Amino acid sequence: MRNISLLIKPVSGICNMMCEYCFYCDEAKKRTQHVYGMMNEKTLETIIEKTISEADAVASFTWQGGEPTLRGIDFFEKAVALQKKYKKQYKRNNLHIMNSFQTNGYELDRQWAKFFKRNQFLVGLSIDGFPEIHDLLRRGKDGSKSFFRVKQAADLLDQYQVDYNILTVVTSQVAERIKEIYPFYKKCRWNYQQYIACLEPFGEKPGTKPYSLSSKQYGKFLSNLFELWYHDLQSASQPYIRQFENYVGLAAGYMAESCEQRGCCGVQYAVEADGSVYPCDFYVMDEYQIGNFNTDSFDQMDQKRSEIRFIEQSSLVDKACISCHYFLLCRGGCRRNRGNGIQTEPTRNNFCEGYKIFFGRWYDTLMQLGKLVQR
């Protein structure tokens, strides 16, 4: 049975906001062609047909950017129609098609909310804590504050009962105030949360930006957040926090759903607006291109992935990590956070000290929760 997971950028890196820490803006600047414009419908159809013809268990389409709402609702209506068309044409009756949509929420209105609900899209909405933290690094193109526009988008999603989660980038500012942010999210009834450690510019020395997250800050952040989450767990009122759910799953002997927490890259296809394909959203740069949907098959793209040894290199872990007491749950973390992101030899994760702070306090608790899951 074959599952296929695509991360598609229908507007390339075009966006209606300016986020200082945007890793995709950094990647785009490091390419020969910075922006690929808007995806045309021919490329869209080629991507969907090839994916559905190959997948026979799950076909997952995650639409991201830049800002994907800029491509317009009609484009996504077309995508849904094509998914139905080729599912029927290739007789994939048991194929489960999933659509996710990552948005900054800046232009999200009732039409979008109705579309997401009607077509069962799972939405990821980017919010960084309080207004003063969010607006510090996430502003409109004209420099305007964006928090309350995004909060209105969340209210619309609630009104139309759209499934969504809050995606928060953990900068130094967020890390320092998580004890206040957590109850604020709880008050907003944001019960599905995902926290992603802020990425440093690719290939550059980490820790030099105003938003840079130190290893110690990240360790304290994880520890404080888990304490709050674990307290609510006692009364079965905890939010779903992806990272902690994955750690508990690992403690129970299951494979983590997140590739970061597996410590090894998975098989993904990050697709630019021109159809070009890369092995990961964090590596959409010329030297990592593995093909193009308009000219190559999945087999050819997978062969190229093997040739550049992308997955194999992600498995290179420092010897000290393998002998570490916490390695069962840590797994070395995401390869993008090892050194400057360019990994060709075993390298320890930049957040190693932070993981030791977190696991030093909560490792035994996580293992106990894993045993409860096993039972």
Image (spheres, rainbow, N blue to C red):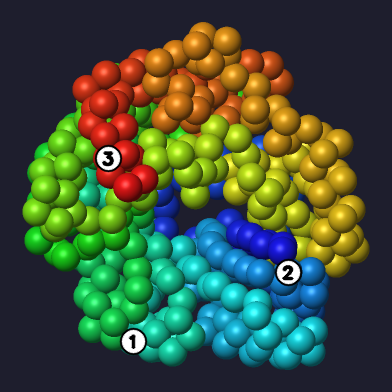
At label 2, counting other C-alpha atoms closer than 10 Å, the crowd grade (few under 14, some 14-19, many 20 or more) is many
Residue that carries the numbered disc 1 in the rendered image: 110
- Judging depth in this view, the residue of 84 and 62 nearest the camera is 84
Instruction: Give the camera-side residue of 229 and 149.
Output: 229
**330 vs 325: above or below:** below
SS for callout 1: helix
- SS at badge 3: helix
What is the CA distance from the residue labelled 3 to the residue labelled 2?
Answer: 35 Å
Q: Which residue is mark 3?
A: 369
Q: In this image, 199 relative to 360: left or right?
A: right
Q: Quadrant of residue 223?
A: top left
Q: Secondary structure at mark 2?
A: loop
The structure residue drawn at horizontal position 53% and vertical position 16%, both measured from the top left corner, is: 322
- Residue type highlighted by circle 3: Leu
User: Three-letter amino acid code at disc 1?
Assistant: Arg
Looking at the picture, how far across and down is residue 315, in whole percent? 65, 28
Q: Measuring 55% from the left and 19% from the top, which residue is drawn there?
A: 339
The tag earlier along the polypeptide, 1 or 2, is 2
Split into 4 quadrants, where in the image is the N terminus?
bottom right
Kind of residue indicated by mark 2: Ala
Q: Nearer the viewer, mark 3 or mark 2?
A: 3
* Residue at mark 3 to residue at mark 1: CA–CA distance: 41 Å
- Farthest residue, direction front: 375
Left or right relative to 155: residue 94: right
Residue 135: image location, x then y, percent: 25, 51
Q: Which mark is residue 55?
A: 2
